[in-house]
């Protein structure tokens, strides 16, 4: 994952949160010098990225902390305490900046919980799209090489795919069985690896069983003999390391200058920590 994914996901959730869109007039991806005339406005402010020391467990993996300032503004010609606490005028209730900040935090928590569920993944290798869902494997075209998390147990370069004409689902099952048979314990990458075939795109996908995070990855190349990697679309696969957002916190909410009357602005600092592979 990249910082831009986190940044965009936070913005998307704010701009689509049912509570916020019921009263917020505008959402902006970045701050502007002049405050627009909207009554309620949310903008994403200055962004920071910090690369921390390497983690202890895995070489080449570091923690990155992404910082986003969420600017929350209320633009009403009212007393300061009304801008903060809200008020009722002619039977209409207006939320103050305190409640706006609370609603923003709630929306962000939902966004990042969803983001973590959606993007925290294990590593995988995915074939290109094939022209058919049936593949003519033979006795001399039946193996691929699959290395998971850099491990090379005996037999990793002769993963059996089949030796007759088979559909992709059956081939995926053969590959999964062959890979799982090389595993020794849960989360070693092999024992609980999964292999699927998408019948709509005719793609194979091999996922590490080593859990989420960038320490998990899959590499598929030609079998050491009787290779069929090209036949299955693995001559140029898409391969991605696992991803893992490990934490997010809100820092102290900051009140901007009170000289901006009738605009009350508070900034909610959000920091998201992710594991990132930087080993090349």
Image: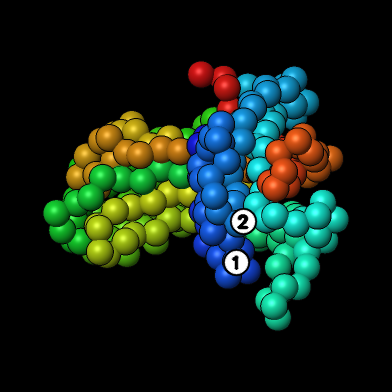
Q: Taking 59 as reference, is 174 above or below it?
A: below
Which element carries disc 1, helix, strand or loop? loop
Name the side, left or right, on which 64 lies relative to 136.
right
Instruction: Say which mark, if any, is on residue 23.
Output: 1
User: In the rendering, at what x and y percent does residue 207 appear?
Assistant: 48, 49
User: Would you say 279 lies left or right of 177 here?
Assistant: right
Q: Examine the image and state in which quarter residue 168 appears.
A: bottom left
- Whole-percent x, y for residue 101 in the image: 74, 54
Quarter holding residue 222: top left
- Count of numbered labels shown in the rendering: 2
Looking at the picture, how far across and down is residue 71, in whole percent?
A: 66, 43
Q: Residue at x 23, y 50 (%)?
A: 129
Q: Describe residue 236's horizontal placement relative to residue 132 as left or right.
A: right
The tag on residue 133 is none
* Foreground residue among 233 and 121: 121
Q: 220 and 158: which one is in front?
A: 220
Does residue 24 sit above or below 7 in this rendering? below
Residue 107 seen in this snapshot:
yes
Residue, disc 2 = 40
Colour basis: rainbow
- Residues packed near mark 2 inside 10 Å, few (<14), some (14 to 19) or many (20 plus): many
**In the picture provided, is 45 more to the left or to the right than 166?**
right
Q: Residue furthest bottom?
A: 91
The residue under the point 34% across, 60% down is 197
How many angstroms separate mark 1 from mark 2 (CA)?
Answer: 7 Å
Q: Look at 64% across and 26% down and name the residue there.
A: 49
């Amino acid at each position: 994952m990249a910082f831009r994914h986190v940044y965009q996901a936070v913005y998307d959730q704010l701009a689509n949160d049912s509570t916020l869109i019921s009263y917020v007039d505008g959402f902006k991806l970045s701050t502007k010098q002049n405050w627009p005339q909207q009554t309620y406005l949310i903008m994403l402010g200055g962004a920071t990225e910090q690369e921390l020391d390497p983690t202890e467990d895995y070489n080449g993996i570091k923690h990155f902390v992404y910082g986003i300032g969420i600017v929350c503004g209320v633009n009403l010609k009212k007393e300061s305490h009304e801008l903060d606490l809200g008020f009722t005028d002619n039977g209409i209730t207006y939320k103050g900046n305190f409640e706006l900040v609370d609603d923003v935090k709630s929306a962000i928590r939902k966004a990042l919980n969803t983001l973590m569920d959606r993007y925290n993944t294990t590593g995988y290798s995915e074939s290109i799209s094939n022209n058919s869902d049936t593949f003519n494997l033979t006795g001399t075209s039946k193996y691929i090489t699959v290395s998971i998390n850099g491990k090379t147990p005996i037999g990793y370069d002769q993963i059996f795919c089949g030796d007759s004409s088979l559909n992709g689902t059956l081939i995926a099952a053969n590959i999964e069985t062959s890979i799982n048979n090389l595993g020794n314990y849960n989360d070693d990458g092999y024992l609980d690896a999964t292999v699927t075939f998408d019948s709509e795109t005719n793609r194979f996908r091999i996922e590490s069983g080593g859990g989420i995070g960038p320490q998990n990855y899959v590499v598929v190349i030609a079998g050491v003999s009787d290779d069929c990697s090209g036949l299955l679309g693995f001559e140029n696969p898409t391969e991605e390391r696992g991803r893992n957002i490990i934490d997010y916190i809100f820092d102290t909410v900051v009140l901007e200058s009170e000289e901006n009357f009738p605009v009350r602005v508070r900034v909610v600092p959000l920091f998201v920590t992710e594991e990132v592979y930087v080993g090349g």
